[in-house]
Amino acid sequence: MTGFAIPTTSTFWLRRAAIPAGTLSVDAAASLGEPRHGYLYDADILIENGRIAAIEPAGTVGEGTDLQSRIVFPTFVDMHTHLDKGHVVARTPNPDGSFTGALTATGADRAAYWTAEDIALRMDFGLRCAFAHGVGAIRTHLDSFAEQAEISWGVFRDMRARWQGKIALQAVALTTIDQYDTPFGADLAALVARSGGILGAVTRMSGVDHGAIVEIDRLLDLLFAQAKRYGLDVDLHVDETDDVAAFTLPRIAAAIERNDFTGKVTCGHCCNLALQPDSVAAETIAHLARLGVTVVSLPSANMYLQDRHAGRTPRWRGVTLAHELKAAGVPFAFATDNCRDAFVPYGDHDTLDSFRFALRVSHLDHPYGDWAGAITQVPATTMGLTDCGLIAVARTADLVLTRARSFDEITSRPQADRVVLRGGKVIDQTLPDYAELDGLTEAAPRTLAGPSAA
């Protein structure tokens, strides 16, 4: 960060930091008074031996690094990604940009190339990008079909161990909902339990795009039964379609109650909630709030895939009802989703970039409020992380220092000159070179049996 000298000593002050609402502990926020512009708390932050030792009103101290009211975030929490799919766009692109095209391309790429070595190379590349951008925790979905499940989960377990202390990693089994009506569904739940993972599914049937599922209630019951058997949380891909009739979100809420499920439930995407009649949407949202279900919006993916038709401009945004969900008390997060694959051919595992996009797409302004918590505190709480996603006394000094002094500056420039502190120390933010991935297109194809991927 040009112009800011971050000390290398064990104790130092960061003066005049601007901390966004939603990323600051309740006690610290109360001690700092009213936030500037309604969403930025001005503070002096004391860092001692890698932890935050004090948070005082700006101007309390006269010595230290003066951030000149620049915005400081805690490291980001990206709770919906697909690290196993990433960075294959050059070798297996989406043929037409559609959801069906993404399914077809991903299935072909997985069947041809997804050895443990291939997944590990791409996953490590993605994690190095995320770390350099200031991401402290990631939840990734893993395509979990037939023989592929054992391969991908094995790679994930190794990556989780290798990245411990840098990025906290969680994984979710991603399969179609009908797989829980087969012996494989039981085997998959056992694998997830052995791997310390989260049980998941996409609410569509194998080999087809989204649509109404006649037996959705029974299939959800089978999934929740396996989750209860092993004490697993659940994370679902839900309603990625503009088909109003294919609306499973209220069915999920009903299944949680019917099965007396007490674990955490997360629903990602929830696209067609935005197309439901107001009364139906309100009733569904209230039900989710009562149950404490977390909803995650993925604007990058949904803006790319939803309402895509050749030669026709999309008529709707594809994103879910962020304002209504949050106002009702539903825990709400934004995340990056796919990166440089058939579902989203763009991105760099940068949660701040996804937040900048969400600010504009979902109108998170006038006022800005505490939306920054949607990429920090809320996902950290859902993921059960106790030293991540929040700026608070006694927390590890894992911080992202930007040049921006307001969210309009955040949205106007990519903040490529941000500085990331981990344990109070500046990290090397050199991004991996794309040339490292050149060999991916030369990998020997392989044959893998099993149904098509989600």
Image (tube, rainbow, N blue to C red):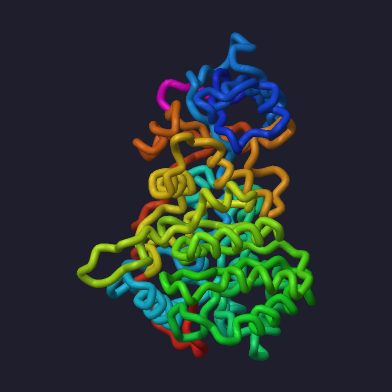
- In which quadrant is the N terminus drawn? top left
Percent position (x, y) of residue 108?
39, 81
The residue positioned 41% from the left and 57% from the top of the image is 300
Q: Is residue 266 above or below residue 211?
A: above
Q: Report the side of 188 relative to 141 (left or right).
A: right
Q: Is residue 188 above or below residue 90?
A: below
Write down the region rendered in magenta. Answer: 1-7
- Left or right of 114, for residue 189: right
Please provide percent x and percent y for residue 435: 34, 58
Q: Is residue 391 above or below residue 97?
A: above
**Residue 280 pos. (x, y %):** 55, 65
Q: Is residue 123 visible?
A: no
Quick one: 115 or 240, which is closer to the camera? 240
Residue 271 appears in the figure: yes
Q: Above or below — where is 1 with respect to 95?
A: above
Percent position of residue 252, x then y: 63, 71
Tell me which residue sits at (71%, 70%) in the image. Answer: 256
Residue 186: image quadrant is bottom right
